[in-house]
Image (cartoon, helix red, strand yellow):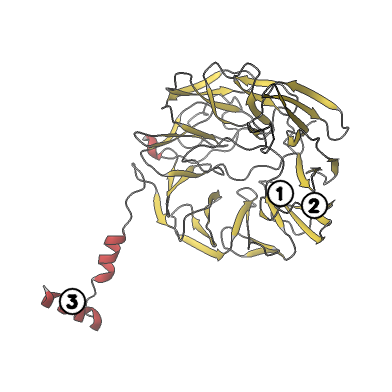
């Protein structure tokens, strides 16, 4: 054995024959991340912080760098050293913003080539949306400017004055006063990718809230919360959430005001938006919700979904049911017997579909698919949110990292893989049809659609308040 090893080493040193790279490749070979196998699987440089599908690319944010890979093959396209990165824009006008912690400025990179499209050296914070990018720069502690940009624009759409920014507002997408989403085990919080900018944003500055109109840049309100209040900006309204301790329990009241006039437009009492902890009713959290809707507990103890714009009850769960995910179209609810997940329309409460699921099932809603998790055995399932039609079913312990129009990225540790919709359900993935090919019915797939992803529906909100050119 020793003689054979000496001969192999001699052959490798002289370059005649070197088996060691092949042996190492065999030892280092990755096991398939799921069954059925994904379209491609790659090992990235570090554990991903976030993953975003952008057109024909996959943007992988890591702790000290960002790398971009081909959506078709997983092959690396480019990488950049950066402490943070975020994607702004849609499939056709997307950019990747990158920067360093505690260092002013950022760069906007082309997702396909990595070329610099715009560079800024003064901004302290950046917010990225599907239809715009915001940044804030300060010449003094109490003199800051907020600017809005088209994702690939070269001059600001508007600028607004802010009397400083909160000390916690730096790097990419620092928290503003809105809603916090429901989360699920094994589904990344940013699985849906960037969303459109809401009509109003609430910036916390020195204990006050500055409400900014994202269409014009006008600061429409400058409000200081009361001692027992928390302020939040949801669905084009400024919410005042009051929680006081009475006889050992918290009593809640929510009122919504039109920021333009300051007039109260709706009010609800006894509706718990889960902003307070149990110690003295101190409100330390934003209300739960998504887009223009709020999630809370009604006075009778049942979970409910509330329209942030006009205060309507869009859905009230049956006794024992549990909300798993919500957007401004649907809600995914775990049944009272904990044996299935039900998709319901907001506004009517009508059940669209249900499927068996365990007591620990998780769920998330994206524009293209509803993602469900299961354990014992481990599963990741993507279905059409309108019909419940299976898009892909994976036997895997990996996490759902990103969902795009035609597939999703899953990952475990440093391994990531892409699976096309239809591939795990026994059908080949067809070409994606144009938006609206189902005739706008919203009740199923259009003619000839046997696989692939559903078209994203209109997401303007119940009052079309999220669309720049909408009414109201």
- Does dot 3 land on a helix, a strand or a loop? helix
Question: What is the x, y in percent for residue 348?
Answer: 62, 18
| Of the pair 301 and 96, the residue shown nearer to us | 301
The answer to whether mark 2 and mark 3 are in CB contact below 8 A is no
- Does dot 2 land on a helix, a strand or a loop? loop
- The residue beneath circle 1 is 132
Q: Please name the residue shown 53% across and 19% down the image.
A: 351
- Does dot 1 land on a helix, a strand or a loop? loop
Quadrant of the snapshot with the C terminus: top right
Placement of 412 over or under 240, stated as above or below: below
The answer to whether mark 1 and mark 2 are in CB contact below 8 A is yes
**Disc 2 and disc 3: Cα gap in Å?**
67 Å
N-terminal-most mark, 1 or 3: 3
Question: What is the x, y in percent for residue 6?
Answer: 16, 79
Q: Is residue 274 visible?
A: yes
**Crowd class of label 1 (few under 14; some 14 to 19; many from 20; radius 10 Å):** many
**Disc 1 and disc 2: Cα gap in Å?**
9 Å
| Of the pair 388 and 342, the residue shown nearer to us | 342
**Crowd class of label 2 (few under 14; some 14 to 19; many from 20; radius 10 Å):** some
Question: What is the x, y in percent for residue 224?
Answer: 83, 40
Q: Which circle marks residue 157 in the picture? A: 2
N-terminal-most mark, 1 or 2: 1
Q: Please name the residue shown 46% across and 52% down the image.
A: 72
**Crowd class of label 3 (few under 14; some 14 to 19; many from 20; radius 10 Å):** some
Q: Residue furthest bottom?
A: 14
Q: Is residue 15 visible?
A: no
Q: Which of the 4 image quarters holds residue 244?
A: top right
- The residue beneath circle 3 is 8
**Disc 1 and disc 3: Cα gap in Å?**
60 Å
């Amino acid at each position: 054995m020793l003689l054979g090893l000496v001969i192999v080493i001699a052959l490798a040193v002289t370059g005649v024959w070197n088996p060691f790279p092949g042996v190492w490749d065999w030892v280092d070979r990755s096991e398939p991340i799921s069954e059925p196998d994904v379209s491609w699987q790659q090992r990235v440089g570090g554990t991903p912080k976030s993953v975003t599908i952008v057109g024909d690319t996959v943007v992988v944010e890591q702790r000290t760098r960002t790398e971009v890979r081909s959506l078709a093959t997983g092959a690396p396209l480019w990488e950049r050293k950066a402490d943070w990165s975020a994607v702004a824009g849609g499939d056709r006008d997307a950019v990747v913003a990158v920067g360093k912690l505690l260092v002013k400025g950022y760069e906007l990179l082309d997702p396909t080539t990595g070329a610099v499209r715009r560079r800024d050296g003064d901004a302290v914070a950046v917010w990225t949306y599907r239809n715009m990018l915001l940044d804030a720069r300060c010449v003094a502690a109490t003199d800051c400017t907020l600017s809005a940009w088209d994702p690939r624009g070269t001059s600001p759409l508007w600028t607004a004055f802010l009397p400083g920014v909160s000390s916690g507002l730096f790097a990419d997408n620092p928290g503003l006063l809105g809603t916090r989403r429901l989360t699920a085990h094994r589904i990344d919080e940013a699985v849906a990718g960037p969303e459109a900018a809401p009509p109003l944003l609430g910036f916390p500055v020195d204990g006050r809230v500055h409400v900014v109109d994202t269409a014009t840049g006008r600061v429409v309100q400058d409000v200081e919360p009361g001692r027992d209040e928390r302020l939040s900006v949801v669905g084009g309204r400024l919410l005042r959430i009051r929680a006081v301790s009475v006889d050992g329990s918290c009593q809640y009241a929510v009122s919504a005001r039109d920021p333009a006039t300051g007039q109260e437009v709706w009010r609800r009492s006894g509706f718990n938006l889960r902003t307070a902890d149990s110690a003295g009713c101190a409100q330390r959290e934003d209300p739960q919700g998504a887009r223009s809707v709020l999630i809370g507990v009604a006075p009778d103890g049942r979970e409910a979904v509330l329209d942030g714009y006009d205060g309507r009850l869009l859905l009230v769960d049956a006794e024992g049911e549990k909300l798993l995910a919500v957007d401004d179209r649907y809600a995914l609810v775990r049944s009272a017997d904990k044996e299935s997940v039900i998709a319901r329309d907001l506004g009517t409460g009508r059940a669209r579909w249900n499927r068996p699921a365990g007591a620990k099932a998780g769920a998330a809603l994206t524009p293209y698919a509803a993602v469900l998790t299961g354990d014992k055995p481990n599963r990741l399932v993507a279905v059409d949110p309108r019909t419940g039609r299976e898009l892909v079913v994976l036997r895997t312990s990996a996490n759902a990292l990103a969902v795009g129009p035609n597939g999703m990225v899953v990952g475990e540790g440093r391994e990531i893989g892409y699976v096309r919709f239809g591939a795990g359900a026994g059908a080949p993935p067809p070409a994606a049809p144009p938006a609206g090919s189902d005739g706008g019915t919203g009740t199923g797939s259009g003619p000839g659609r046997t696989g692939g992803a559903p078209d994203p529906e209109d997401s303007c909100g119940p009052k079309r308040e999220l669309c720049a050119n909408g009414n109201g």
